[in-house]
Image (tube, rainbow, N blue to C red):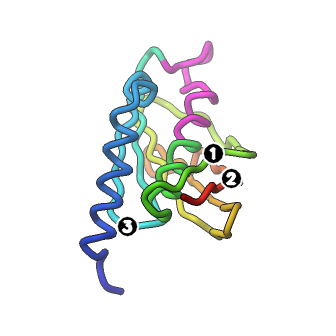
Amino acid sequence: MSGPTDDERARCATVRAAFQAAPFYDLLGIRVETERPGTSRLTLSNRAELRQSQGGVHGGALMSLADSAMGVALGTALREGDAWSTVEMTTQFLEPVGGSDVVAEAAVARLGRTLAFLDCSLESEGRLVARARAIFRVRRA
């Protein structure tokens, strides 16, 4: 399989920069990495502010990470000027997250004219800790 084209790399860089500029992602400590259209890799820094009463990372932070990862993956698959928003998301929490960072990897499963379907896996210390699926509404430019 060949690597991404210059146009694909530029689109990924544009989406990455837009997400990194949003204050919410900075607040959560999410770092965005993406080099290939239709996929993403985001890392959530495990910080004390994100932990729930039992010491693990709060499920809401994990869901925000998954939603963000799927949004980035979709954004890289669309054209400049297209818009998207989450319609529905389901998350399964498979095991608690300890003290390590969490890595989310997302991919577009199907991209239609007005709807997109995405999958995401979240890992910490090499273990699958959660998975998510989402449907996004797509508004073409």
Quadrant in which residue 45 is drawn? top left
Viewer-nearest of labels 3 and 1?
1
Left or right relative to 141: residue 27: left
Dot 2 corresponds to which residue?
137
Under tag 1, what secondary structure?
Answer: strand
Q: Residues within 10 Å of mark 1 (few under 14, many from 20)?
A: some
Dot 3 corresponds to which residue?
36
Residue 136 in magenta stretch: no
CA distance for labels 3 and 1: 21 Å
Instruction: Give me the disc on residue 102.
Output: none
Q: Residue furthest front?
A: 141
Q: Amino acid at mark 2?
A: Arg
Give residue 82's position: percent from left, percent from top: 52, 56
Q: Residue at x 42, y 36 (%)?
A: 44
* Picture quarter with the C terminus: bottom right
Q: Residue at x 28, y 62 (%)?
A: 10
Under tag 3, what secondary structure?
Answer: loop
Q: Give the magenta part as a residue range.
A: 50-65
Q: Residue at x 59, y 17 (%)?
A: 52
Residue 56 in magenta stretch: yes
Viewer-nearest of labels 2 and 3?
2
The answer to the question of whether label 2 and label 1 lie on touching residues, with beta carbons closer than 8 A, is yes
Q: Residue at x 37, y 67 (%)?
A: 36
Dot 1 corresponds to which residue?
85
Depicted 101 relative to depicted 134: above or below = above
Q: Amino acid at mark 1?
A: Ser
* Labels 2 and 3: the sequence-earlier one: 3
